[in-house]
Amino acid sequence: MTVTHDFQNDIDAVGRSKAIPTLLETITMATGVGFAAVARVTHARWVTCQSVDKISFGLKPGDELEVESTLCHEVRQYDHEIVIDDVNNSPDYVDHHCPARYGFRSYVSIPIYRADGSFFGTLCAIDNEPRHLKDQHVLSMFRLFAKMIGEILDADEILAETQGAVAHERKLAEVQEQFIAILAHDLRNPVNALGAGLRLFERREIDAKARELVSFMRGSVNRMRLLIENLLDQARNRSGGGIVIERTLSNDLHPSLEQIIVELQAVAQGQEIAAAIHLPEKVNCDVPRVSQMFSNLLANAITHGAAGSPIEVDVKLDGGSLTLSVTNYGSKIADDMLPTLFMPFEHGQDRPSREGLGLGLFIASEIADGHGGTLTVDSTDERTVFTFQMQNTENSMARQASG
């Protein structure tokens, strides 16, 4: 028996979910597509529920298309997924009215089902350039995410009926943890392979333009690698393992921070990174973890800093205390966002992130805590400054796990 779900309630359920924007952001980062969305599809209507749009395709939540003009209509009619790497090389779709009307080259649409077997809509993505969407790792990710969205919808319905019963809260947590585990498993190896491939390119005789392009690509790969590491740290935190900190006296922090600046400057077009690093002696810290924290703070500054304004980095060791600050110029962080700024998967309406999953500042704060230090923020109408401070004492605990 087919169960009839309320159309608007279904759309609202997707809109309430904090996990679905994370899935859509992940799709764009993992595949390179510029637009990803969850759509509610019936025989008569096609409505955008949530979307991530990096190519100005123009659809936002609540926007509607003529259902017959979409390939999602065929997905619903014939109960199958549609995947196109390149419309121009597809005998089935090169002359199809839908690509011609909306101007895309690559496309994927995966059906979303409720637990009772009823068709909800589609998880779809497009780009105006060819993309390798038929890759089995990519398809497995789309299918998993579509399944998860269906589970999120069902969990939301149960949660509303039972007024937030604990059992269903745990179900949502399990869905999120499953997502993190699958994401790390499916994306870590491909990202490492991309990094290795770029290193091979850099060893070849290539012209300046190609070398610049490789540099930009390496910056993107490094951002994806950092995202994956943040997700793995979040997974370890949720399982009770915490972030392990191993402090040692080392001279390696200075060159490590400089390397991060070089890598992120490649993707910070129009934003000069002005750095002043003064470390006259060894630093007692976990160099990879402090570098990860710095990378998160610098990436956050690049994302939210005003175009054309510099980003300032100040790192100094003075009087047995290490201070690391990152400053960007631009709009103030809203006061109501400050209490949850260092919480995972939290984005505010006044300062929406253009990329990422909202884990960077959370992981940075965990690393600061693990060093027995503090991470604070000071935001005004002109600038925002994140500051990390810790004592550079040799008798600090060599191994700590942040709570």
Image (cartoon, rainbow, N blue to C red):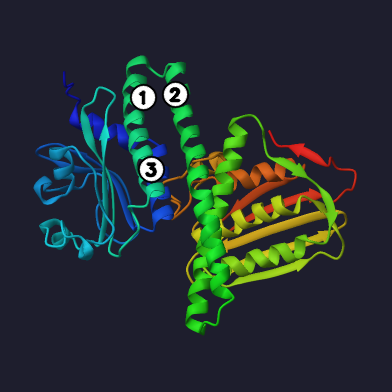
Q: Image point 35% across, 44% down: which residue? A: 142
Which amino acid, mark 1?
A: Ala
Residue 43 image offset from top left, x and y in percent: 10, 37
Q: Image point 18% across, 31% down: which residue? A: 7
- Residue under pointer 3: 140
Q: Is 340 located above or below residue 166 in the figure?
A: below
The local secondary structure at tag 2 comes to: helix
State if disc 1 and disc 2 touch (CB < 8 Å): yes
The local secondary structure at tag 3 comes to: helix
Q: Is 2 located above or below residue 68 in the figure?
A: above
Q: CA distance from mark 3 to mark 1?
A: 22 Å
Residue farthest toward the bottom in the current orientation of the protein? 207
Mark 3 and mark 1 lie on one chain; the one further toward the N terminus is 3
Q: Is residue 228 left or right of residue 322?
A: left
Which amino acid, mark 3?
A: Ser
Q: Is residue 269 left or right of residue 327?
A: left
Q: Image point 61% across, 36% down: which residue? A: 236
State the mark number for residue 155. 1
Which image quadrant: the C terminus?
top right
Q: CA distance from mark 2 to mark 1?
A: 7 Å
Instruction: Report whether residue 329 is seen.
Output: no
State the mark number for residue 171. 2
Mark 2 and mark 1 lie on one chain; the one further toward the N terminus is 1
The local secondary structure at tag 1 comes to: helix
Report the front residue among 298 and 199: 199
